[in-house]
Image (tube, rainbow, N blue to C red):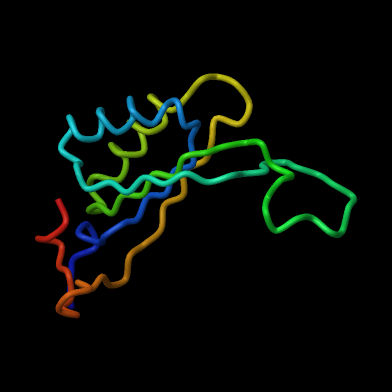
């Protein structure tokens, strides 16, 4: 697949406070970005513990976070990041973090065919 640099797909993963998710998602949808995945997770941030036997049940963390994932065209990345930042911000420590990665290829599960940029809106 030969695509121009400005048409590269990006994956945005944002970890935010759960009570900010509704506002973020509504703003994304209103701005034309309806294809969003949301899941709940736990995070430790700058957590420090001297115990080498940290539980795999994550009982060490009482910090619930929501993970918002969205794949978009490179040209839409800055707008999406700005929406998440603006509407996820509380001004307090631990507001979250946003990661942006390149998407080399995407495939439909049902058919195994490559998803093109025309499929990403």
Establish if 44 lies above or below 54. above
| Quadrant of the drawing holding the N terminus | bottom left
Say which of 66 and 10 sits in front.
Answer: 66
Q: Quadrant of residue 109?
A: bottom left
Q: Residue at x 71, y 46 (%)?
A: 59
Establish if 5 lies above or below 114. above
Q: Residue at x 61, y 31 (%)?
A: 94
Q: At which x and y percent is residue 68?
A: 39, 44
Position of 30 compared to 86: left or right?
left
Position of 60 compared to 29: left or right?
right
Position of 85 compared to 7: left or right?
right
Q: At which x and y percent is residue 35?
A: 22, 48
Q: Residue furthest left?
A: 118
Say which of 74 and 62 sits in front.
Answer: 62
Q: At which x and y percent is residue 10?
A: 31, 56
Q: Residue furthest right?
A: 50
Q: Residue at x 45, y 26 (%)?
A: 19
């Amino acid at each position: 697949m030969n695509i121009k640099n400005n048409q590269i797909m990006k994956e945005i993963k944002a970890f935010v406070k759960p009570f900010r998710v509704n506002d973020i998602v509504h703003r994304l949808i209103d701005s034309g970005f309806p294809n969003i995945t949301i899941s709940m997770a736990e995070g430790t941030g700058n957590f420090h513990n001297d115990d080498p036997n940290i539980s795999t049940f994550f009982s060490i963390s009482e910090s619930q976070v929501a993970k918002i994932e969205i794949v978009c065209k490179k040209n839409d990345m800055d707008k999406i990041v700005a929406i998440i930042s603006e509407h996820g911000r509380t001004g307090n420590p631990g507001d979250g973090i946003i990661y942006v990665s390149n998407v080399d290829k995407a495939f439909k599960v049902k058919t195994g065919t490559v998803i093109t940029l025309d499929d990403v809106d």
